[in-house]
Amino acid sequence: MRPRYVPNRGINLDYILWLFTRISGLGIILLCLIGLASAMYMGARLQMDLPTVLRWTFLPNPNHVVNSNIPDVVPGWANAFWQIMQFLIVTFAFTHAANGLRMFAEDYVGHTILQPFVRAFIALIWVAMLIIAYYVIIGSAY
Amino acid sequence: MAYGKYTGFKGWLYKGSTPYYAFALHRLTALGIILFVGIHVLSSFSMQQVLGTWGTTINAIYEAWWFQIIVIFCVIFHTFNGFRVAILDIWPRFIKYEKETVYLLWAIFIPIYLLTVFILVYGKLSGG
């Protein structure tokens, strides 16, 4: 554990990412609440048990609740609204996670020769996971 | 976090106060969520594209009720503590009540988590 070299005050990338962590965290909570409320409006209260409701809240994907045999999940629940919700949640969550990993790495690695490699590695994981997750979301709509 | 000193593993045992344990748990649950969601996305990709059976095996473990209890702990704690941190960052004048916000966090977290665990275990026991 090393002290971090904090940049000067003002608008810089470190500050923007710090702000993004807060905004995306609150944004994920808001998206989950919107997903939960609209699922309840569509009848989840009568069709789902608690684990299924939680799974739908975290990622509103028809395949995510496939084990619960919901009768009209494909006609009623797989549409553009939920697809946009999934894209937003996945983008916010993975960016939040990649930035969090960067924070951990910079607390432990610090300003050494390793730092650019660690940053590049985390950025690579971030892009790869986003592509895979988008592929899963688009692929599960049909 | 022990400015200017290398503390190593002992840093985790540092004589911190209530907000420090929330901070440490926040990092621990963050790593748990990253591991869980990362492997879960990869295994779901493998299931969807039918790349062998390892994805099905991993997702079967993830759907087990005892694993859900761990995942729910990480997700709910990280959500509530992150909400607390965001609120304190938006209104910094409340930072002098940080210890009280952590007590409030546990007072909100423990009933919700115990209720969720109760419903998960009860559903498992009654075969629902």
Image: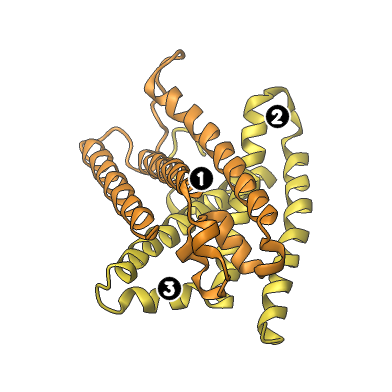
Element type at mark 2: helix
Tag 3, which chain?
B
Outermost residue on the top side: it is A10
| Residue in the image at 58% along x and 70% along y | A70
Q: Quadrant of residue A108?
A: top left
Q: Which residue is mark 1?
A: A81
The N terminus of chain A lies in quadrant:
top left
The residue where tag 2 is placed is B95
Circle 3: element type: helix
The answer for how far apart the CA atoms under marks 1 and 3 are is 26 Å
Chain seen in yellow: B
- What residue sits 79% from the left and 52% below the top? B107
In the rendered image, residue A142, in percent from the top left (x then y), is placed at 37, 60
Nearer the observer, B3 or A106: A106
The image shows residue A48 at horizontal and vertical percentages of 65, 68
Using a 10 Å C-alpha cutoff, classify the residue at mark 3 as few (fewer than 14 neighbours), some (14 to 19) or many (20 or more): some
Instruction: Say yes or no: labels 1 and 3 on the same chain.
Output: no
User: Quick one: which chain is orange?
Assistant: A
Q: Disc 3 marks which residue?
A: B59
